[in-house]
Image (spheres, grey):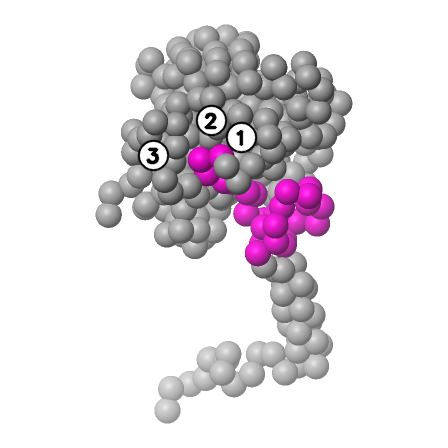
Amino acid sequence: GKRTTVPSIRARKVDGTTEQPIVMLTAYTMRMAQLLDPHCDMLLVGDSLGQVIYGLPSTIPVTLDMMCAHGAAVVRGSWHALVGVDMPFGSYEASPEDAFENAAHILKETGCAAVKLEGGEAMAPTIEFLSNRGIPVIGHVGLTPQAVNVLGGYGVRGRKDEEVYKILADARAVVDAGAFCLVVEGVLEDIATRVAKGVGVPVIGIGASARCDGQVLVTEDMLGLFERTPRFVKRYADLASEIGAAAERYAGEVRDRSFPSADETYRPKT
Ligand code: KIV
Ligand code: NA
């Protein structure tokens, strides 16, 4: 099989609608990528790995090196899905030239096909600069977690009229600048639907609307592995309890010396 391409994702939206919604999940490791890849159109190496993998308080401290290491692992573990890698805070905001250098580094180090960066109108010149120079860009508007210090938290966006206008203007600016798809996160359902109807490229929702052109979740959230999850996360598994139960059984068998048994020990050949 051939890996999903940027033009094929872009082409999933025709005349403002996407017949089959785009399936996206996050992945940070080789093995998780292998397991998710057959079911996903896109895998996102999100900077959410800051909290999920590294226990950081936000995505702010995430580095380019972290994104490259995990991005390369996910590309190695996948063969079908298009892999996108988040640009970390501080790696793209200062200038289009800086952003290009760092995005090129991500593509070279990981083998991914696209980068994602947060922001609307202010980032449009950067998105245009990258897109015109061989680097496909996924936009991200609405609740943008790297702006936590400006927004003052992770609350849903679009409850005030001026926020609604800003989100719609941001989405249009990002798409006009050349983003081939767009994540809309943490906004009122009606606003997410208006964003999806209002732009020509696929809009991938998270905490958004079923009428988006696709959906994304943080995999650890939907697997029930991460402790705190927002309302928009649906749990498709409860792996935290399974892992706890497995560790408990293991600990018991180590302590009563029933592990390792004959099946798990090497003996002379007879
Ligand atoms: O970092 C991330 O996981 C993301 C998705 C939730 C869209 O940006
Ligand atoms: Na992110």
Read off the residue under disc 1: 193
Range of residues picked out in magenta: 212-236
Q: Residue sitting at 39 percent across and 27 percent down?
A: 16
The residue nearer to you, when weighing 184 against 257, is 184
Read off the residue under disc 2: 197
Tell me, yes or no, whether the two marked residues, 1 and 2, touch with CB atoms within 8 Å: yes
Q: Amino acid at mark 2?
A: Lys
- Residue 108: x %, y % from top left: 36, 27
Is there any visible trace of residue 43 in the rendered image? no
Q: Earlier in the sequence, mark 3 or mark 2?
A: 3
Q: Earlier in the sequence, mark 1 or mark 3?
A: 3
Horizontal side of residue 110 vs 172, given as left or right: left
The label on residue 12 is 3
> Please, what is the dominant secondary structure of the magenta stretch?
loop
The residue at the far left in this view is 1
For the C terminus, give its image quadrant: bottom left
Mark 1 or 3: in front is 1
Q: Secondary structure at mark 2?
A: helix
Q: Residue sitting at 62 percent across and 60 percent down?
A: 238
- Residue 264: x %, y % from top left: 50, 79
| The quadrant where residue 206 appears | top right
| The quadrant where residue 18 appears | top left
Q: Amino acid at mark 1?
A: Thr
